[in-house]
Structure formats: structure tokens, C-alpha cells
Image (tube, grey):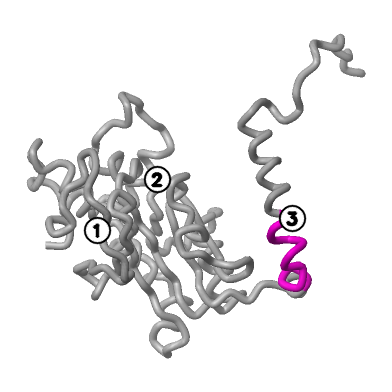
Amino acid sequence: MDMPIPPPGPSVDPLGGDALHRLVAGFGRFRHSHFEADHEVYDRLLDGQRPEVMVIACSDSRTDPAIICGAQPGELFVLRNVAALVPPHEPDGRPHGTASAIEFGVVALGVRHVVVLGHSFCAGVRCLLGHDHGGQRFDYVSDWVGVAREVREEMDGLVTEAERLLIARRAEQAAVLASLRHLATYPFVAERVADGRLALHGWYFHFGWGVLQAAEGPRGPFRQVDGGAPRPAIGSCPSLEDIVA
């Protein structure tokens, strides 16, 4: 049976308002300044992508890895999810979005480096620690961040009200290290790490201070790797010395 056709309603902007109009205007600037100006780059990318680096980053709108690292098109293969988490290898026959992206980057593209990029003020890690997000409760987010429950167990007993902000920063870094450990449980990752074809890295972007830190080992600590001086703390940022101590 044919579905009835609804009567025409009031005129609706197909772009949905100012926010999407700004994005379309931004695309115009991109097309002029990058796509047309660097058309050789995009012509070359028609043949396929050959990135050397895969970045596993948070979905947070403030921490785009391509912007943070000044990457060019085709330079990074990026996977983003809440809190930049990697679940342990789980061959159960079910669809696994994060695992499939890792497999594609490592096996199909042959990346040489996988970087897990965490960041400060991460709402996903806050949820993992059991802190609410503006009084909200989530069905899917809570289950997802549970893949890093070892971080919460590591932080249990350490948190007092005075230390909560500092512990959150350390938990964000601990989540990066947990994801690195989980990465090593994937056979195709472990095999390539063992024979030197692949290296795993843990990075942490503190955007309150404007610094990039890297883990010196599987248990840390994180040390600054960029050459810039941390900007003065604003708001409720703890000192950089406290974070890396």
C-alpha cells in the first residue's frame, strides 16, 4: 500500500541553521586554500593512502589529532572514540569497530607507528572514575569506558576531594597506558612489534597547559616532548610538576 504523502510544511533550511552554515563556509575556505592550492597532493592521494602513523584519539571536539600535530592529508590514519580506549583482543565473532580500525591500519595499511593520544579534562575518563557529567547518566558510555576498569581500580583509594582534579589527570594518562597494554594483546600487533615492523607510543595532550607529553615506558612516566614552554595555568589546572611527579 502506498504511503500517504504529507502536505508540504514550512520552508526548512536543509543545512539546519548557523552551525552547519559555518561548516559549509569552512569547506569553501578549505577548497580554496588547500584542495585547489595543493591539488597535486589530492591527485596523488587518489591512488590510495600510505600513512606511516595511526593515531587512536578521543572523540572530544577540542583535541583533533590532525590539528594538534599539523598533519597533512594522507599523513595520519585516525581512529577516534570516547576516551581513546582500546579494548583487549576478544575474538568472539561479533563486530568490533575499534578492533577493525586497528586491524585495517596495521595489516592493510602497514603503519609503522600506533600512537594512543589521551588528553586532559576527558569526560570519558571522568565517567570511568564514577564522576557524573553534569548530572547525566549514560547507557552506552558507561559500558564502553568499562574496558579500562583497571584504571579505576588503580585510582581507587587515592581520591580525596582535594586531589580529585589531580587524580583525574593521572587517570587520563593511566588510560593511555592501559590502551597500550590492550593493543599488545592483538596477535597481529604483537607479531609486528616483536619483529620491529611496528612501534607503540603513548601521548598525552594537556590543553590547559598547551604541552604534549609522551610515556617513557609501559608504566610511564609522561614527559614533555615538544619544545614549547607551558603557558600559565588558568582556571583549575594543577601545576605541570604535580602531573608528571
- Which residue position is annotated with label 1? 174
Q: Is residue 193 magenta?
A: no
* Secondary element at tag 3: helix
Q: Where does the magenta region start and end?
A: 31-43
Q: Residue at x 30, y 45 (%)?
A: 121
Circle 1 packing at 10 Å, graded few (<14), some (14-19), many (20+), is: many
* Location of residue 101 with respect to 21 vertically, above or below: below
- Which residue position is annotated with label 2? 144
Depth check: give the residue in front, 48 or 211.
211
Badge 1 amino acid: Ala
Q: Earlier in the sequence, mark 2 or mark 1?
A: 2
Label pair 3/1, CB-CB below 8 angstroms: no
Q: Residue at x 46, y 76 (%)?
A: 113
Distance, label 2 to label 1, CA atoms, is 16 Å
Figure quadrant of the C terminus: bottom left
- Which residue position is annotated with label 3? 32
Identify the residue at the far bottom of this view: 195
Badge 3 amino acid: His
Which-is-in-front pick, marks 2 and 1?
1
* Secondary element at tag 1: helix
Percent of width and height locating residue 226 = 33, 69
